[in-house]
Image (cartoon, coloured by chain):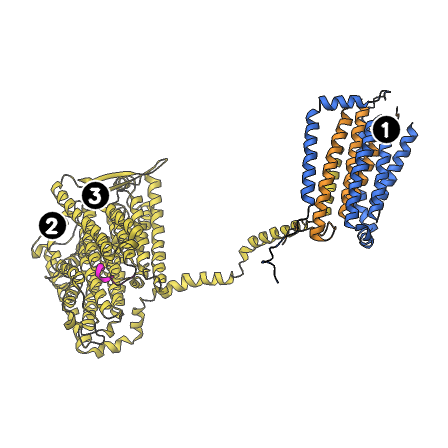
Chain colours: A orange, B yellow, C blue
Amino acid sequence: MLTVPVETQIIFAGIIFFLGLIGLLVRRNMIFMLMSIEIMFNAAGLVFIIAGTHWKQPDGQVMFIFILAVTAVEVSIALAMILQVYHHFKTLDSDAVNNLKDQN
Amino acid sequence: MTTIIALIPALPFLSFLILALFGHRLSRKVAGFIGAGSIGIIALLTIVISISFFHSLPEVKTYTIRVWEWINAGNLKVDISFSLDALSLVFCFVITFVGFLIHVYSIEFMSKDEGFTRFFAYMNLFIGSMLVLVLADNILLMYLGWEGVGLCSYLLIGFWYKEPANGYAARKAFIITRVGDTAMIIGIFILFLNFGTVNISELMQQASEKWVAGSSIAVLTAALLLGGALGKSAQLPLQTWLPDAMAGPSPVSALIHAATMVTAGVYLIARTHVLFSLAPVVQSAIAVIGALTLLIAGFSALAQHDLKRILAYSTISQIGYMFLALGIGAWSAAIFHFMIHAFFKALLFLGAGIVILVLDEEHDIFKMGGLRKKMPVVFYTFLIGSASLSALPLITAGFYSKDQILWYSFSSQSGSIILWLAGIIGALLTALYSFRMIFITFYGEAKTEPSFLPGKLMTVPLIILAILSLFGGFVELPASLGNIHLFSNLVDNALPVTVTKSGDGLEFLFQAISSIIALSGIYFAYIVYFKKPSLSEAYSFSRLNKFFEKGWGFDKLYDTIFVKPIVWLSVIDKNDFFDLWNIGLSRLTLLFNRLLSATQNGKMRWYLLSFAIGIAVILTYMLSK
Amino acid sequence: MDVFFYIAAIVAIISTVMAISGRNAIHSLLYLILSLLSVSVIFYLLSAPFIAALEVIIYAGAIMVLFIFVTMMLNIGIERETEKQWLRPRMWIIPSVLAAILLVNLILALKNVKTIPPNDEAILPKQVGISLFSTYLIGVEIAAILLMAGVIGAYHLGSQKKKVKHRFLEIK
């Protein structure tokens, strides 16, 4: 139904993915970093759907459902950990959580 | 029967192991019993072996037993095997017998010392190594024993290790003998390289067949082996360690530095005499070195005032006599003098040990005196020992042995009047310094009082050694005085017979001259040191005397030539220029460490950035292909 | 039909950009929801209506709401000043350059792809369901276990246990 070339579709998904990457690298607040990871997950799932439509197989959509489930779990665990970090460090700055640095 | 030969070195090693491993749990009595008892057992075994050996002469001249294979690498095949011939038998007898007496003496001498079991462990290790040395069938095993006695000498000189001067003396001994040992091992290498075997009898046989007398390789090898002998026997120029080695306990001085280890050089030369006959220039060098050493040491002994140092220089001098005899080809005379010297020198050292011990570690003879009445047994045995050392005519064994050397130094094929003159002057000096020792230590008024009297364990060995010093010479009487040749007949089974060029009639004349010299020496000592001590005291402050006392300046010479330049080099290298490479390397590593640890700053965004950069690089690289 | 795709794509990109560069957390999350909705439209256009619905329900409906809950719980919308301090324009340069490089790589990698002409058939949810429960059954089961693990983990990690000291041990 769509006649948009596949390359364009994938490039579009790629743009969204790289925007998420930029957000991950730039932001310091942990919530935002997690948000950027969500964007990246979403873009990856989009690529799967594009591929599934391209090759006319249901496998793409099946993969997307799995990715969705994994994302859900991951978000809940990550948010719980952010809560713990906040209660321990009293801040959401990811640069403040550098206890694993090389103490020389 | 031949397996007993293997037991002779094995028992001291066994008792060394027992004492070293379990010594701290044993009581003094048991430890002394094990230590001295093992030597007593092997003394008995030696007697048993010698009886059987005498019976098997003259058909069987050597007993050999192979115990096990040691090295088998390519064409180097070395076994642990022992061979006993007349030469080894004499040495074994002296080592085990005199060693046993010294061990018994040490039980009482070291009884108040805290390192009692350690002492006996080291002494037994020494006896074992020395026996390996003299019984070894191949030259590599002999070198093993050689090194073993060097090690034990180091351990025993520095026995009282808490005093740093003792450690210094021990190191000095080890290092100087090491110079000789290096020469010896190079000689052994040359021998193996040329003949492909290390068995001594095979080596000697092949050397006599293949090497031309006087060829440079024979001279080189003989000179190298001579170097080893010079180191161990404290002859010129490696003699400086022996006077300092007196820092060890007196039994050690008696055993190692009088009777046995320092005679290892004599044994080596006697054992490899074929090589020395192939290099006549080296053999003459031995005679010259012996003559020079006995003179230098004799003059030095006259100037010492430490009792044990007098005896140390006397040892150097007497071994000079043995070297003189070896150098002129008087093989049996050298071995005879070795045996008699072992008796009286051990006696003198043990007596000196008692004197020093009862006077609370007083070594200076000018602070002793009047001990004649206080310790009669010690005095009379010491007197007998000194008389034997001075070769008092007819009654002492020393007369017969030294006189034989003096006669051969004139009359043998390579002897000369000059060598005889050196020997006779040496005899005068010997008489002078030994009776100087007697008069100052035992006569006169007592300047230090003895704190206790020695017990039986210390005096009985003295008495036995004194008897041997008197009557031990009767196994070898010269032609003019009885013509008994028991000893030389025995030793001639292993060593060549001495060839003389003049007749026996002159021998009596020479004996008369040496007797007169010895007696006049004693008389001079009496006058100068006892009747009118003012004569000697005036001389003792002169510069010549100080020069003699410092051992003719050899220590100073070696210090200037060897020690000072190396110390100077290490001082200018204090900042360790050559270590810069290592330091630079470590600093470089630390720099990289700092750089790399800066990349591990625990910040998540930094890590994510590195992920992203990595992915970008890899993808670009893969796409560019 | 293509024009809808392009519109939805542009909306998605713009809202994503607003989401990642916002100062206020709640605003960013709302922009993200907008982005997800436009992606859902794209899904519908790609003949995956079921997935479009799932995207809205689960992703925008559950996950983002979870985000918003936590954000409100932690009260971080107030910290605008800190965010301003942390987000300087200078910081955008290097990540943007990297993303640009990667995008160029992606474009170059796609040059050699053969295009199959599009078909009229859509992949119906029925096909997806059959594939899910026959070929990928194990995946379904494992996803279920994963979800359960996630629930337990999230409960455990999220609980705050107050350390209770016996009153005798309290420091007076």
Residue C27 is situated, as x and y percent measured from the top left of the image, at: 85, 46
Give the chain letter at badge 3. Answer: B
Q: Sequence-wise, which precedes: disc 3 or disc 2?
A: 3
- Looking at the image, residue C117 sits to the left or right of residue B434; the answer is right
Splitting the image into 4 quarters, where does residue B548 fall? bottom left
Q: Nearer the viewer, residue C154 or B307?
A: C154
Q: Residue at x 38, y 62 (%)?
A: B558
In 3D space, how far apart are the residues under numbered discs 3 and 2 (Cα atoms)?
23 Å
| Residue holding disc 1 | C44
| Residue holding disc 2 | B486
Q: How many marks?
A: 3
Give the chain letter at badge 2. Answer: B
Query: Is there any visible trace of residue A28 in the rendered image?
Result: no
Mark 1: amino acid: Tyr
Mark 3: amino acid: Ile
In 3D space, how far apart are the residues under numbered discs 2 and 1 (Cα atoms)?
128 Å
Residue B603 is situated, as x and y percent measured from the top left of the image, at: 71, 49
Q: Nearer the viewer, residue B256 or A55?
A: A55
> Which mark is in front, 3 or 2?
3
Q: Which residues are magenta?
A: B106-114
**Within 10 angstroms of label 1, few (less than 14), some, or many (20 or more) residues?**
some
**Mark 2 element type:** helix
Mark 2: amino acid: Leu
**Within 10 angstroms of label 2, few (less than 14), some, or many (20 or more) residues?**
few
Disc 3 + disc 2, Cβ < 8 Å: no
Queried whether the magenta region covers residue B331, the answer comes back as no
Residue A28 is situated, as x and y percent measured from the top left of the image, at: 77, 49
| Residue holding disc 3 | B5
Depicted B455 relative to depicted C45: above or below: below
Residue B484 is situated, as x and y percent measured from the top left of the image, at: 9, 52
In 3D space, how far apart are the residues under numbered discs 1 and 3 (Cα atoms)?
107 Å
